[in-house]
């Protein structure tokens, strides 16, 4: 059983009477526990691909199966339910809710699932990303890297089967980046979470089992890095 299956996925935007194809016929399959990265130049379609895989957006053609559930025919609400059950997402632009504190942002997915002790769990998650003292701060009171770590804690809160991370280390210094990357791989090892990373950091990409490179919306290579660390 696959955790993520993408078949002939394409996405075309219509704007100003012209159409722009940003993803063209992308296919791949991931098994539970796989680690996978997507690399490619700016504008090549990486964020678009991640959004389609997570059911945040609809493809123009092709299919996405998440935990063998076909997303294409589901309503917005049904896709949200699948996401809440299986998916964690770390957005390139964080997407924290501005009117909620850091702690409350991390609590959102827990409360959506009706979990008891959401505040305590959220506090523990913030401690894991080094922000135990900052729970009462609002996103605007946090630096970019701190917001990114809150976003990471929120993505972990669901104990997702599948974690999508769009440039998870894009705004972090070397030390914080190493901590965040260790957390991602720890989640993979300990909970079997499948990792799908978009990154410009080839060193980080080389730590995943498989790397696809996209350019102009098409997959131009699909490789297994030789140097596999932990
Ligand atoms: N809603 C939209 N309407 C029209 N074009 C869009 C829309 N969203 C994205 N695009 C275009 O799709 C292309 C791919 O965008 P995407 O965000 O997936 O790139 P990316 O590979 O993630 O780039 P980066 O590395 O800069 O984050 C870009 O040319 C972008 O301008
Ligand atoms: Mg992007």
Image: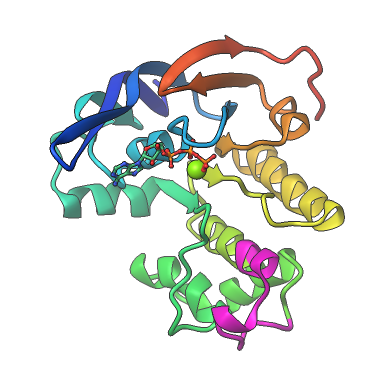
Q: Residue at x 50, y 22 (%)?
A: 214
Residue 134, relative to residue 2: is it above or below?
Answer: below
Q: Residue furthest bottom?
A: 136
Q: Quadrant of the C terminus?
A: top right
Residue 148 lies in magenta, yes or no?
yes
Residue 68 makes an appearance in the image: no
Residue at 81% across / 56% down in the picture? 173
The quadrant holding residue 187 is top right
Q: Is residue 154 left or right of residue 15?
A: right
In this picture, residue 25 sits left or right of residue 35: left
The N terminus, quarter of image: top left
- Depicted 173 relative to depicted 101: above or below: above
Q: Position of residue 221 (x, y in %)?
A: 56, 11
Which residue is farthest right? 175
The correct choice, above or below, for 170 with respect to 125 in the image is: above
Residue 209: image location, x then y, percent: 66, 21
Question: Which residue is rendered at x = 35% and y = 54% of the image?
Answer: 84
Q: Residue 151's quadrant in the figure?
A: bottom right
- Residue 148 appears in the picture as rendered: yes
In this view, the residue in front, 52 or 17, is 17
Q: Residue at x 52, y 61 (%)?
A: 94
Q: Is residue 114 magenta?
A: no
Please say if 79 is above or below 112: above
Residue 126, given in percent of the width and then of the height, sits at: 66, 71
Residue 164 as seen in the image, left or right of residue 229: left
Q: How is the image coloured?
A: rainbow
Give, as a single range, the part of the protein colored magenta: 133-149
């Amino acid at each position: 059983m696959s955790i993520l299956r993408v078949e002939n996925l394409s996405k075309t935007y219509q704007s100003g009477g012209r159409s722009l194809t940003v993803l063209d016929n992308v296919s791949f399959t991931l098994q539970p526990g796989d680690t996978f990265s997507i690399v490619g130049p700016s504008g090549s379609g990486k964020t678009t691909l991640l959004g389609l895989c997570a059911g945040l957006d609809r493809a123009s053609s092709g299919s996405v199966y998440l935990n063998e559930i076909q997303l294409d025919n589901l309503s917005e609400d049904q896709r949200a339910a699948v996401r809440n059950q299986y998916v964690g997402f770390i957005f390139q632009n964080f997407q924290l809710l501005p009117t909620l504190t850091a702690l409350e942002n991390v609590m959102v997915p827990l409360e959506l699932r009706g979990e008891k002790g959401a505040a305590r769990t959220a506090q523990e998650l913030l401690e894991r990303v080094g922000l135990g003292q900052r729970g009462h701060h609002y996103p605007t009171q946090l630096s970019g890297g701190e917001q990114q770590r809150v976003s990471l804690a929120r993505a972990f809160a669901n104990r997702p089967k599948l974690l999508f991370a769009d440039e998870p280390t894009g705004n972090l210094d070397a030390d914080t980046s190493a901590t965040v990357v260790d957390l991602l791989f720890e989640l993979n090892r300990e909970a079997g979470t499948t990792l799908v990373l978009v990154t410009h950091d080839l060193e980080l990409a080389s730590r995943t089992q498989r790397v696809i490179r996209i350019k102009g919306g098409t997959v131009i290579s699909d490789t297994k890095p030789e140097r596999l660390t932990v």
